Image (cartoon, rainbow, N blue to C red):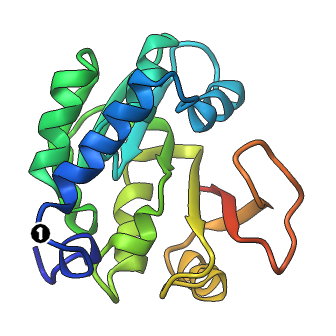
Amino acid sequence: MASTPRWFSDTNDGHSQWYVDRFRTLAADGADLAGEARLIDAIVPPGSRVLDAGCGPGRLGGALHERGHTVVGADVDPVLIEAARADHPGPRWEVADLSTLDLGEEEPFDVAVMAGNVLVFVAPGTEVEVLRRVAAHVRLGGRIVTGFHTDRDYRVEQFDTDLVAAGLTLQQRFSTWDLQPWADDAEFAVSFLSV
């Protein structure tokens, strides 16, 4: 990888396992962990191809697989990919840096999802290339849906500049995964991009 993703540089030792354990505990406690998956399921036809870019331990991709979609998940952290494979069999899970993502000559995806602050945790300065590499895997006319907290080092204004530099177009923006209207002071940004 060209530079170190913030996922590794801005977190403590053991963070990856803590993250896996956190979501396993939430699932065991019956927490609703499928909100993003419900939204993605609603915007694509049944049986769509979904790229879960920055998939973490697989909760989103696993839920979309259960809904009948073909899912490939990619994440830079082998600990998270190991958990995804263990907890959510069915999708294909790959260890990959999104800034150099190359899944080969496979059929393009209908949609790519970057939920859970993915762009906040990539290596600084690679955001445009991450958007380009993810977009390269999505069919013409497909979409990328991103979501991240607005109070981190990576801001919405920079994202808007980066998505244009990556050749993408902002279609819509909301302040939550359940489509609350966007406001400039929103704590979260869910953006729909056209490829």
Residue 32 on image: x %, y %: 58, 29
Residue at coordinates 28% horizontally, 22% vertically from top-left?
91
Q: How many marks?
A: 1
Asked whether 38 or 98 is in front, the reply is: 38
Residue 46 in picture, x, y percent from top left: 59, 13
Q: Nearer the viewer, residue 138 or 74?
A: 74
**Which residue in the protein does label 1 denote?**
13
Residue 62 quadrant = top left
Q: Is residue 172 rendered to the left or right of residue 43? A: right
User: With respect to residue 121, does 37 lie above or below?
Assistant: above
Residue 104 visible, this orientation? no
Q: Please name the residue shown 27% across and 78% down the image.
A: 6
Decide: is 88 above or below 104: above
36 horizontally vs 1: left or right:
right
* Residue 142, quarter of picture: top right
| In the image: residue 94, left or right of residue 186 | left
Q: Secondary structure at mark 1?
A: loop
Residue 73 position, x and y percent, is 30, 38
Image quarter (top left, top right, bottom left or bottom right) of the N terminus: bottom left
Q: Horizontally, is 195 left or right of 68 in the view? A: right
Residue count near mark 1 (Cα–Cα under 10 Å), binned few <14, some 14–19, many ≥20: few
Task: Report the residue at 32% width, 87% height from top.
Answer: 124
Q: Is residue 81 above or below residue 1?
A: above
Q: Position of residue 135 (x, y in %)?
A: 44, 57
Determine the residue positioned at 68% across, 65% down: 189
Q: Amino acid at mark 1?
A: Asp
